[in-house]
Image (cartoon, helix red, strand yellow):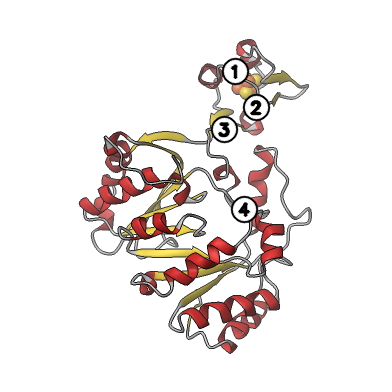
Amino acid sequence: MKLSLEPVMNPSKLTGNVFDIKRFALHDGHGLRTTVFLKGCPLHCCWCQNPEGIASTKQVLYFANSCINCKTCLAYSKNGGITSQEKGIKLCREKTEDWDTIINMCPTNALQYDSKTYTVNQLITELKKDLVFFQSDGGVTFSGGEPLYQAPFLLESLKACKQANMHTAIETTLYAKKEIIEEIFTYVDLIYVDLKILDSKNHQRYVGAKNDGILDNFRYLLTSIHKDKVIVRTPLIPQMTATKENIEQIAKFLFHLYPDVHYELLNYNPLAKAKYEYLDGTYCFSENPKPYNDEQLQKFYDIVLQQGIKHLIIE
Ligand code: SF4
């Protein structure tokens, strides 16, 4: 279902799992934007900035700072999903529980779902509230997770956005079938694509999947009618993506496909580490590195420029 685009009987009633709707975003496209974060990603980048977006299903989160240790949740837990600790509770989200009730009964919202289910109609109604801000230059950006992972919901949402005359953008890894990309990108005005690692073995090691399909989709995209609406981005992750070899290989690959490609390097963002704590996950760095300084960034820019890329976006 998620990775195919069969005709849908009643598209406006199709549902999707959304883990955030961020208003007034300035870095996800032109102008003021509303960014819709769709849940589910087939990749597992070990530095993922949105780990709450990886699982495709709803998950329960526990915010220990908001817990007043009242143990109400414990009284409604029947199967060991909540256990007592000296300070607060321990959550075992894999257990089958009446999570709706448990979450509703928590008096301080220390327990919450990480996402919400929307129909296409509900989502568009929400987005239309922001039309006034989109008038001059802004629009809607679909991000994730990997938004293509909920392809049918994404497609119908994009169609509805275009019907409402909204500018549309997407942030994607291109990890999807080419037919899906072809169909969906017809309704997208601006395409941000991550290209993290070119070497196949390193891609498997740090991103958790092979990159053959991704690179094939780049070959298609950067020679297609969509090529001028594409901005390729590489997040600079110390020791993983931010190596001379990797940046050089990516720049060479992109230039060879389309010399006028627009390319951007995103500085390392150390803020994601905190999210792993409330998800009980392990972040890739025990010692969180700092973002690169101007001098270090310039060295990466020089590597890109030496490969012939003219449109390097520098913020
Ligand atoms: S109900 Fe909420 S506040 Fe009370 S112990 Fe459970 S998580 Fe903490």
Q: Nearer the viewer, mark 2 or mark 3?
A: 2
Q: Identity of the amino acid at label 1? A: Glu
Q: Is residue 161 visible?
A: yes
Task: Tell whether label 1 touches label 3 (CB within 8 Å).
Answer: no
The mark that comes first in sequence, 2 or 4, is 4
Which amino acid is tagged 3?
Answer: Gln
Q: Secondary structure at mark 4?
A: loop
In the image, residue 186 lies at what x, y percent? Answer: 31, 60
Q: Which residue is mark 2?
A: 94
> Horizontal and vertical percent for residue 137?
28, 64
Q: Which quadrant would the N terminus be assigned to in this image?
A: top left
Answer yes or no: is residue 294 visible: no
Query: How far is the residue under mark 2 from the one under mark 3?
Result: 9 Å
Type of amino acid at the residue the image marks with label 4: Cys
**Residue indicated by mark 3:** 59
Please tell me which of labels 2 and 3 falls first in the chain: 3
Q: Residue at x 45, y 80 (%)?
A: 258
Circle 1 — which element?
loop
Above or below 216: residue 286: above
| Residue type highlighted by circle 2 | Glu
Q: For marks 4 and 3, give the CA distance.
A: 17 Å
